[in-house]
Image (tube, grey):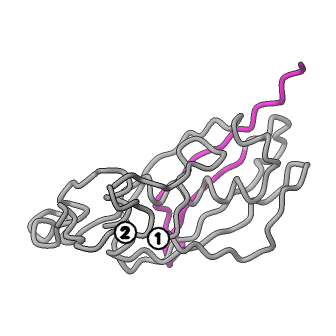
Amino acid sequence: MTAAGITERPPWQDTDGTVKARQDFAKGFIKHSALKVQQDTAKGWPGTMKEQLETVAMTVTQEHINQYAELTQDFNPLHVDPGFAAGTPMGRTIAHGTMSLNLIWLALARSLAKDSLGRVDLDIRFAKPVFAGTTLEAGGRLEKGSASGCYEVWVNGPDGTAVITGTATVAAASEG
């Protein structure tokens, strides 16, 4: 049994515990089967800056939180121990902030040219905690008059309240 209370081997681990999850193109964006992310528009790698990032959504479950704890080796009891979390001001477990942040990376990855992702500078603020059972939606919009490729990005809860806000600036490709 692990600190997260998972007794079976997660699908993204080898029998010896080696993590097989692969890092995708973007910094910090971790893609694995546990985060069953649903998209609402077609996939693609367009070569131009879209005015609107593709919206992505997921409903966070405690199982997702536990699997993300395994993946990141972050077993903070606020994330994985309902008994502990019940005695905190949060009142229950919360998702890792970086788990929700991955939705922004996914929106960027589905909307921008592949070679752009390594040139993204992300500046975000975690505004609210995310609890199990919360449906999140992430996206972004090119800022008006932005010649530099600066997107306003967000992750919102079901009522439209921001849980993450910020900007993603895509630097111009270097001539080489």
Mark 1 sits on what residue?
A: 34
| The residue stretch that appears in magenta | 151-176
Q: On the picture, is 6 further left or further right than 175?
A: left
Where 145 falls versus 7 (above or below)? above
Q: Where is 170 relative to 24, above or below?
A: above
Q: Secondary structure at mark 1?
A: loop
Assess whether residue 171 is covered by the magenta stretch: yes
x, y (%) of residue 78? 20, 60
Q: Name the quarter where the C terminus is drawn.
A: top right
Q: Position of residue 142 (x, y in %)?
A: 77, 50
Picture quadrant of residue 138: bottom right
Tell me the amino acid under the disc marked 2. Pro
Under mark 1, the amino acid is: Ala
Q: Specify whether residue 19 is painted magenta.
A: no
Q: Which residue is mark 2?
A: 10
Front-most of residues 125 and 97: 97
Q: Residues within 10 Å of mark 1 (few under 14, many from 20)?
A: some
Question: Residue at the location (41% across, 53% down)?
Answer: 19
Give neighbour class at mark 2: few <14, some 14-19, many 20+ (Cα, 10 Å).
some
Marks 1/2 in contact by CB < 8 Å: the verdict is yes
First in sequence, mark 1 or 2: give its number. Answer: 2
Q: Is residue 95 left or right of residue 165?
A: left
Q: Nearer the viewer, residue 37 or 94?
A: 37
Quadrant housing the N terminus = bottom left
Is 117 situated left or right of 67 in this image?
right
Could you say which is closer to the camera, residue 90 or residue 38?
A: 38
Residue at (10, 72) in percent of width and height: 83
Q: In percent of the image, x 81 and y 73: which residue is there?
A: 42
Query: Horizontal and vertical percent for residue 133?
Result: 38, 80
Return the residue nearer the eye: 69 or 128. Answer: 69
- The residues bearing labels 1 and 2 have C-alpha atoms spaced at a distance of 9 Å
Q: Is residue 102 above or below residue 40?
A: above
